[in-house]
Amino acid sequence: MSGRSWTIMAPLLASMLLVGLAAGSEEEEDGGGKKKPHVNHGKFKAEPWTDGHATYYGGRDGLTDTTDSGACGYKGQLGKDYGTLTAAVGPSLYTNGTGCGACYELKGPKGTVVVTATNEAPPPVSGQKGEHFDLTIPAFLKIAEEKAGIVPITYRKVACERKGGIRYTITGNQHYSEVKVTNVGGAGDVVALWVKGNKRVKWTPMKRSWGQLWTTEVDLTGESLTFRVMTADHRKATSWHVTPRDWQFGKTYQATKNF
């Protein structure tokens, strides 16, 4: 290659190298420590059908002890926002909280229903096939008669349809902030969360406390906060400047966009 050709090609090769390095930096660890590239395009697609079984629990209104409490941390109005069609899912779907917020379509003897995972269910019932879904009574009545008690089902994970943007509820204090993530569309289940301020706080990974509650000891006060969510399908959504600089603990801030 002539000296002139190399002079022309060198900047191009350098640019390609920088692009490659940037692409590599987009890999993030999921809940199991595995690194996979995130996806910026397309939408979550329903997974294949598989066997399971369903029971029911909680009050007849579908809110008591179900969407208003539980192992995902969806309490108060934020829990009620998920409605009455929710489920506690078995340990292999709950996966220490990473499965919170996922949506499943269930087929039973009577019909079908789409539910959101908001709690953890006991392990599969002895003698029954597949994963255990413990449904609210309103959800169970969509697929079976109440007297059945326990029924075989087929189920698949589907995209969550949400109204409005992702919500972030911030509690704690200057030295310890806890963020609850709700109303997540697409895959629905958050496996990683980052926060960034508008000045001194750089991109900071948050740690899962339990369910969909995430914590950091970085002082977030006095900054307009941006959050970046990654769901189980490794897609990301960034909620730019979702809070004002004078945001307050105990309040919920909603992004303009969702998956």
Image (spheres, rainbow, N blue to C red):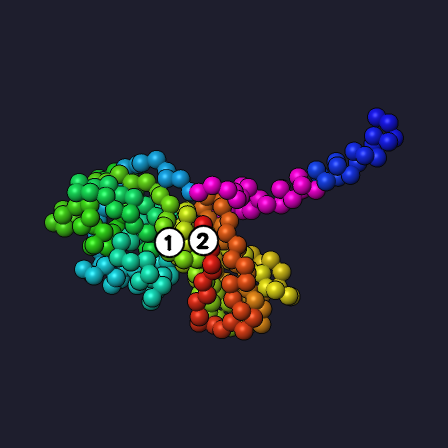
Q: Residue 154, how many percent across, how many down?
A: 26, 38
Residue assigned mark 2: 258
Say which of 238 and 118 sits in front. 238
Asked if residue 91 is among those painted magenta in the image, a careful observer would answer no
Q: Amino acid at mark 2?
A: Asn
> Would you say 213 lies left or right of 103 here?
right
Residue extending furthest toward the top: 1
Which residue is painted at 87% across and 30% down in the image?
3
Q: Is residue 127 above or below residue 77?
A: above
> Would you say 143 lies left or right of 211 here?
left
Q: Are marks 2 and 1 in contact (CB under 8 Å)?
A: yes
> Would you say 155 lies left or right of 219 here?
left
Q: Please, what secondary structure does the residue beneath circle 1 have? A: loop
Say which of 207 and 250 sits in front. 250
Q: Earlier in the sequence, mark 2 or mark 1?
A: 1
Q: Please, what secondary structure does the residue beneath circle 2 have? A: loop
Residue extending furthest toward the right: 3
- Crowd around label 2: few <14 · some 14–19 · many ≥20 (10 Å): many
Q: Is residue 227 above or below residue 16?
A: below
Res 220 quadrant in image: bottom right
Q: Which residues are magenta?
A: 18-43
Res 210 quadrant in image: bottom left
Q: Amino acid at mark 1?
A: Arg
Inter-mark Cα distance, 2 to 1: 8 Å
Q: Is residue 159 visible?
A: yes
Which residue is painted at 41% across and 47% down in the image?
187
- Label number found at residue 162: 1
Q: Residue 5, how many percent across, how many down?
A: 83, 30
